[in-house]
Amino acid sequence: MALEFEKPLKAETTNIPGMLVFDLTVHGDSRGWFKENWQRAKQAVLGLPDMRPVQNNISYNVERGVTRGMHAEPWDKYVSVATGSVFGAWVDLRPGDSFGEVYTCVIDPSKAVYVPRGVGNSFQALEDGTAYTYLVNAHWSAQLKSTYTFVNLADPELGIGWPIPLEEATISEADLGHPALADVLPMAPRRTLVVGCDGQLGRAVRALAEERGLSRWFDFCDVDTFDMSDPGAYGQYDWPLYGTVINCGAYTAVDKAETADGRVVAWRANAVGPALLAHVCAEHGIVLVHVSSDYVFDGTAEVHTEEESFSPLSVYGQSKAAGDLAVAGCPRHYIVRCSWVIGEGRNFVRTMAALSDRVANPEDSLERVTVVGDQLGRLTFTCDIAEGVLWLLGYREGDLEPSSPCACGTYDLTGSGPVESWAQVATRIFNLANGNGAKVVSVPTAKYYASVEGSIAPRPKHSALDLSKIEATGFVPRDWTERLVEYMATR
């Protein structure tokens, strides 16, 4: 078939979500032709994901009519033709509304197709001596092969109009024996590993995954089963099976981190662990989500943006800043920066509610409670962090796989609403618990800690984070004062 020269490079979407067809620019004359078959920078601008290929395969087809497929493997493909031409057919075998969608086109050296993981791929050689080539972004392994999905390329339900009738084509017995679409088990999405699942945030992520029907594709681990700061622990996972790691683990004992022993533990959990996670995620093209803290700043600015330079005051803040820097080196990462986190387990809200109960009890000698009044911020409820993380990853309501991921990078995520002091927050809690907010006494930080023995970590004065970046993606966190009312109702 005639090859069209000098077409401009362009990309077209298809009816199969995520699948792209590229027109490639081929330069030719009487001697032959030349093309850039894959050009990462140019095609990224046109929407090609940074698939990070690790292997290049070529299928040589001796005769016209050789027909191969329909296979869906657990990796992304970028397919093209080196010589000759093929009729390509693709079927979406991923779970969801697009399951069973079919797309076909002819590929010659001037075309290429990006095929997302889980989309079945088949082709029929239209010329003798056709060489079909494809890049993939995972090395073959026996465990990965066990996740393949197939469909019968002759299934009438697919309605594929093969140019050469299949009864005249050359097809393997294995391909002829694949199941009909009605009997196909959809390919499971890449798995998500949640690290630190027994902490406040980890429990919230697990609860949301279960609520949305995603937990069957999530694995959960805590430090007892996976110590992310131990290089030897990484061998227990087959990392090519994972598409996302959500790091909910951290050492958060801010004052203990100032001690000799606590400093070591804090740096292992908050810096060494994230650095090792970032390395393995970068190596395997995995998306890494890492939760950070307002403590990476000194609190001088009244509102902190994602672009502010690090200026931590404490060992805890320094270790978190080091973890952020390590994670930022992972090509596909989200750093989610929070402040004043509240979830299940011991936290400020529950402590204040318990103190309010004591003050309200006439048999208890506690008459009032002093709370710091010159540190300002907003509460962040773990349910909002969990929702924000899934939103950034691209999960929308009803999605079983990410469909619209946000741009990678750093995002501030706290509750919206007023910026208040710890003492003002405590007053709200006391009023909600027993109507005794007047019993909260606001004091300066220096006075509050004057009589405390042991190491006390310096705190940022201002912890409010700018939410405009994450709100621009369409995710608007709930007002923390509304969340507080709901939280207190279930205490």
Image (cartoon, helix red, strand yellow):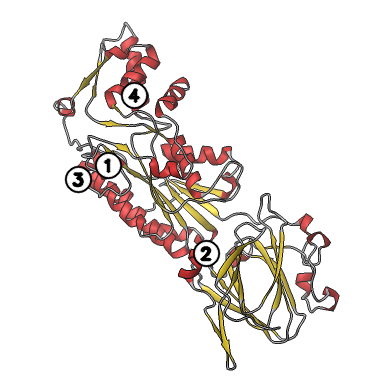
Q: Residue at x 57, y 37 (%)?
A: 211
Q: Reading the chain from its start, which is encountered first: label 2 or label 3?
A: 2
- Tell me if 347 is positioned left or right of 3 in this view: left
Q: Residues within 10 Å of mark 3 (few under 14, many from 20)?
A: few
**Sequence-wise, which precedes: disc 3 or disc 4?**
3
Instruction: Please name the residue that numbered disc 2 is placed on.
Output: 46
Compared to residue 141, the image places residue 201 above or below, namely above
Q: Residues within 10 Å of mark 1 (few under 14, many from 20)?
A: many
Question: In the rendered structure, which disc, 4 or 2, sits on the residue that comes first in sequence?
Answer: 2
Residue at (84, 78) in percent of width and height: 168
Front residue of this view, candidates 57 and 265: 57
Q: Amino acid at mark 4?
A: Thr
Residue type pointed to by label 2:
Leu
Kindly identify which numbered label has been placed on residue 351. 4
- Please report contact status of discs 2 and 3: CB closer than 8 Å, yes or no: no
Residue 214: which disc? none
The alpha-carbon separation of the residues under discs 4 and 1 comes to 21 Å
* Residue at mark 1: 295
Circle nearer the N terminus (2, 1): 2
- What amino acid type should be assigned to the residue bearing mark 3? Ala
In the picture of the structure, the residue carrying the numbered disc 3 is 260
Quarter of the image with the N terminus is bottom right
Q: Residue furthest bottom?
A: 31
Q: Nearer the viewer, mark 2 or mark 1?
A: 2
